[in-house]
Image (spheres, rainbow, N blue to C red):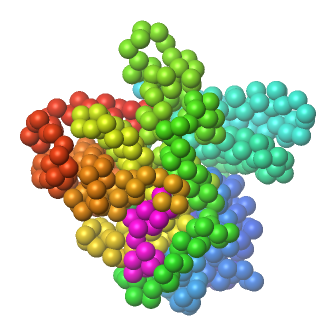
């Protein structure tokens, strides 16, 4: 059984669809306008899929979808569009915002059932909670106790709201900060990333002096608590609409379950199975993959003229987050002369990263004394290593600022892994100083396109699944430029070294780089990229799988020899020698993304 929200202004069509879904055992909820749909969705966070009519009375379905995709709670909620027309502008609007599928009326039971199955398997609520098994293992508790804690946590979150609303404009925010600290602690303990995002949004709006926005995010804690509560009650078998009265935070739920003959909290229920995604789907979800054939039609239209993308990224039309990406490029160009204080200042702008860096430093420290401050962590790890960790996290945060529909965690993990591995390779091969910057910057074009044009970037990734060798060609056809050329141009503007720019352009064939230094740097990044992909650390954005044979046969080895680099071991021997290094890097990446 699935919970479904039908947004349809025609009462006859709505009734037909309700009857159809009820006969199949589902629980439909209805709304006839955008405002009503938002209200129903926030009251019942168990909604698995929204079935959205394109044209409502004086409104369009995309207006509701726009709200959903900007909201940090519901931004991943699957939405199925039903339309009576095939208006190109509307279709493009829906594609940009991200939908599971677009179907043409009349309603078709078989098609809807297929989309319901996909939505349930997608499990959008599971994306904002740490897997229960991991939390239980960390806290050394059983699943029932975890879900009881989630209910208690929901009550706590709701109780913070009125007090925070009263304190938000006060001059002395110490008590307010105590509320935020308590919520942050609860989020980390129970693995509720959604709550962590809410706290971050409140802190960010307060730093910017946006009181009204702060109040908005504080009040968003109520549906956040409701989602926590509903998730826990679902575990105990309470999923019917009539089992969620107005008082969502009562203490009578377990008794109610026993009265109705359902399993109580004493009876452990297995968690529902979640469909396993392939690497591309980890980044773009399943919805875009429904439109591969439609996307092929768009490629021939040359939607962007040559130079248009660079002008947009450099001007007022740049998406939220683009400026942060470009600031990181400038940071990398000055890394060699940056002071410890300036580096720590940059780190402090990303909530929670300093704590993770201290933990990583402790895992690496051989001094015997515990690292407790960011200055100590910087001393243990060094500026280059810290930048390898911080920059991908900063780019990931930049992508989330605009409520990007793409899930770019895997791309950030891969970027971090390549940068950390290349540091180790650089020590073995040469004293050139630009390895970390080159490893981080070689994918910056992907980040720029993914943040500015998420739907179109996702489209190119889908074509990469079919033929990885043609990804750059597809990007040029669509954007008028490929991600490598784009990345090289912005790296040059930021003042990065020529070897960094050459690495971006000649990563796959380092021998084509213009000079020895560039060939060495590009070769190191090439080998690090292969090692990260072989080990499955994150996802580079290319579907083609690689194996150890790709490392052994990489053109980087010939480029290194041509640049007079001494290679004392054969490639297979290096592969064996680097096994422990890559494993250590994998552990660091996992710690950074916990």
User: Left or right: 80 with respect to 365?
Assistant: right
Can residue 80 be seen here? The reply is no
Of residues 200 and 166, the one drawn nearer to the viewer in this rendering: 200
| Vertical position of residue 148 compared to residue 209: above or below | above
Q: Position of residue 284 (x, y in %)?
A: 43, 62
Residue depicted at 39% across the width and 49% down the height: 438
Number of marks in the rendered image: 0
Of residues 67 and 443, the one drawn nearer to the viewer in this rendering: 443
| Vertical position of residue 110 compared to residue 377: above or below | below
User: Left or right: 139 with respect to 540?
Assistant: right
Residue depicted at 39% across the width and 81% down the height: 477
Magenta span has 244? no
Can residue 44 be seen here? The reply is yes
Q: Position of residue 288 (x, y in %)?
A: 44, 70
Q: Residue furthest top?
A: 368
State the image quarter where residue 15 is shown.
bottom right
Q: Position of residue 302 (x, y in %)?
A: 45, 86
Of residues 242 and 422, the one drawn nearer to the viewer in this rendering: 422
Of residues 367 and 131, the one drawn nearer to the viewer in this rendering: 367
State the image quarter where residue 122 is shown.
bottom left
Range shown magenta: 476-491
Residue depicted at 40% across the width and 21% down the height: 363
Q: Position of residue 1 (x, y in %)?
A: 47, 58
Residue depicted at 82% across the width and 49% down the height: 210
User: Left or right: 438 with respect to 561?
Assistant: right
| Vertical position of residue 454 compared to residue 576: above or below | below
Magenta span has 484? yes
| Dominant SS in magenta | helix
């Amino acid at each position: 059984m699935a919970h479904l929200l039908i947004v349809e202004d025609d009462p006859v069509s709505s009734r037909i669809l309700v009857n159809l879904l009820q006969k199949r055992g589902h629980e439909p909820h209805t709304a006839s306008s955008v405002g009503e749909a938002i209200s129903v969705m926030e009251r019942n966070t168990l909604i698995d899929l929204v079935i959205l009519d394109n044209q409502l009375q004086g409104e369009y379905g995309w207006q509701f979808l726009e709200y959903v995709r900007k909201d940090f709670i519901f931004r991943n909620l699957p939405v199925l569009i039903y339309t009576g027309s095939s208006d190109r502008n509307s279709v493009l609007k829906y594609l940009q915002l991200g939908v599971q599928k677009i179907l043409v009326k009349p309603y078709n039971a078989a098609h809807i059932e297929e989309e319901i199955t996909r939505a349930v398997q997608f499990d959008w609520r599971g994306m904002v909670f740490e897997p229960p098994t991991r939390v239980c293992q960390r806290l050394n508790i059983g699943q029932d106790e975890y879900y009881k804690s989630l209910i208690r946590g929901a009550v706590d979150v709701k109780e913070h709201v009125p007090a925070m609303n009263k304190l938000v404009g006060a001059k002395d925010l110490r008590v307010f900060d105590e509320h935020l600290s308590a919520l942050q602690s609860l989020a980390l303990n129970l693995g509720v990333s959604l709550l962590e995002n809410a706290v971050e949004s409140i802190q960010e709006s307060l730093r910017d002096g946006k009181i009204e926005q702060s109040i908005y995010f504080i009040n968003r804690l109520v549906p956040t608590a409701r989602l926590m509560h509903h998730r826990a009650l679902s575990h105990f078998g309470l999923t019917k609409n009539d089992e969620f009265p107005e008082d969502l935070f009562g203490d009578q739920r377990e008794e109610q379950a026993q009265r109705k003959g359902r399993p109580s909290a004493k009876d452990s229920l297995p968690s529902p199975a979640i469909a396993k995604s392939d690497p591309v789907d980890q980044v773009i979800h399943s919805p875009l993959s429904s439109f591969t054939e439609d996307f092929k039609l768009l490629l021939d239209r040359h939607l962007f003229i040559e130079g248009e993308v660079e002008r947009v990224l450099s001007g007022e039309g740049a998406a939220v987050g683009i400026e942060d990406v470009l600031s990181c490029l400038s940071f990398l160009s000055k890394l060699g002369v940056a002071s410890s204080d300036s580096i720590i200042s940059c780190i402090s702008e990303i909530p929670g990263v300093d704590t993770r860096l201290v933990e990583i430093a402790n895992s690496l420290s051989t001094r015997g004394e515990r690292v407790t401050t960011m200055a100590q962590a910087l001393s243990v790890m060094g500026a280059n290593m810290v930048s390898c960790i911080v920059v991908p996290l900063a780019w990931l945060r930049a992508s989330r600022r605009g409520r990007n529909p793409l899930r770019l965690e895997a791309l950030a993990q891969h970027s971090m892994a390549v940068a950390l591995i290349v540091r180790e390779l650089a020590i073995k091969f040469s004293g050139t100083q630009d390895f970390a910057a080159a490893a981080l910057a070689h994918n910056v074009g992907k980040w720029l396109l993914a943040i500015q044009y998420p739907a179109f970037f996702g489209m190119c990734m889908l074509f990469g699944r079919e033929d990885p060798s043609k990804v750059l060609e597809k990007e040029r056809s669509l954007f008028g430029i490929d991600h490598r050329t784009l990345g090289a141009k912005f790296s040059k503007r930021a003042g990065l070294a020529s070897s960094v720019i050459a690495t971006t352009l000649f990563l796959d064939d380092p021998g084509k780089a213009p000079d020895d230094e560039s060939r060495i740097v590009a070769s190191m990044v090439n080998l690090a990229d292969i090692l990260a992909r072989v080990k499955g650390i994150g996802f580079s954005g290319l579907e083609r799988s690689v194996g150890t044979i790709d490392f052994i046969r990489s053109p980087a080895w010939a480029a290194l020899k041509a640049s007079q680099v001494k290679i004392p071991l054969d490639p297979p021997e290096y592969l064996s020698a680097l096994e422990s290094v890559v494993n250590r890097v994998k552990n660091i990446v996992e710690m950074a993304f916990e």
